[in-house]
Amino acid sequence: MGRFDESGRLYVEGRDDEMIVSGGENVFPQEVEDCLSRHEAVVEVAAIGVDDDQFGKRLRAFVVVSEPQPSVDDLKDWVKENLARYKVPREFVFLDELPRNATGKILKRELAELD
């Protein structure tokens, strides 16, 4: 999935099969990851959709950060300033590192199993 800007440049938003519907709104985790990765304290990030009784799905962001560690509110405010309000992850999990396979790909299935 992608979009063209006013200059005709293509921006890849994410894969169609990764899109989640949260409260009736389409959210691409990759777009949220890209936004959070631009925060000065975020070293790496992965976002996934998790089940939610009220919204169907919601975003959970797993972040590796540098010191001084930002608060959850700092990260939520960052996303609110750069993306639509409904794209703000409801939950943040701070990790020392993200799980990866031998080729370096983030293992989102392992993240989904963390609670």
Image (spheres, rainbow, N blue to C red):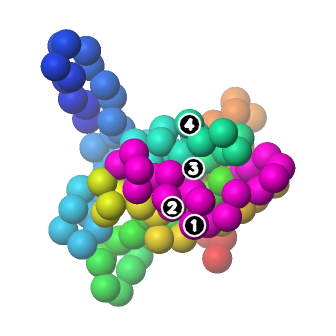
- Frontmost of labels 1 and 3 is 1
As displayed, is residue 20 above or below residue 102? below
Q: Residue 74: x percent and y percent? A: 59, 59
Residue 113 in the figure: left or right of residue 41: left
Q: Tell me if residue 72 can be seen.
A: yes
Q: CA distance from mark 1 to mark 4?
A: 16 Å
User: Farthest residue in the bottom direction?
Assistant: 53
Image point (33%, 28%), residue name: 12
Q: Quadrant of the N terminus?
A: top left
The three-letter amino acid code for the residue at tag 3 is: Ala
Of the residues under marks 2 and 3, which one precedes in the sequence? Answer: 3
As displayed, is residue 70 above or below residue 34? below
Helix, strand or loop at label 1? It is: helix
For disc 3, the marked residue is 46
For disc 2, the marked residue is 76
- Frontmost of labels 2 and 3 is 2
For disc 1, the marked residue is 73
Image point (39%, 69%), residue name: 58
Q: Which residues are magenta?
A: 64-83
Q: CA distance from mark 2 to mark 1?
A: 5 Å
Q: Which mark is residue 64?
A: none
Of the residues under marks 2 and 4, which one precedes in the sequence? Answer: 4
Q: CA distance from mark 2 to mark 3?
A: 15 Å
Instruction: Mark 2 and mark 3 in contact? Answer it, CB < 8 Å.
Output: no
Q: Residue 7: x percent and y percent? A: 19, 13
The three-letter amino acid code for the residue at tag 2 is: Lys
For disc 4, the marked residue is 38
Q: Quadrant of residue 53?
A: bottom left
The three-letter amino acid code for the residue at tag 1 is: Asp
Of the residues under marks 4 and 3, which one precedes in the sequence? Answer: 4
Helix, strand or loop at label 4? It is: loop
Of the residues under marks 1 and 3, which one precedes in the sequence? Answer: 3
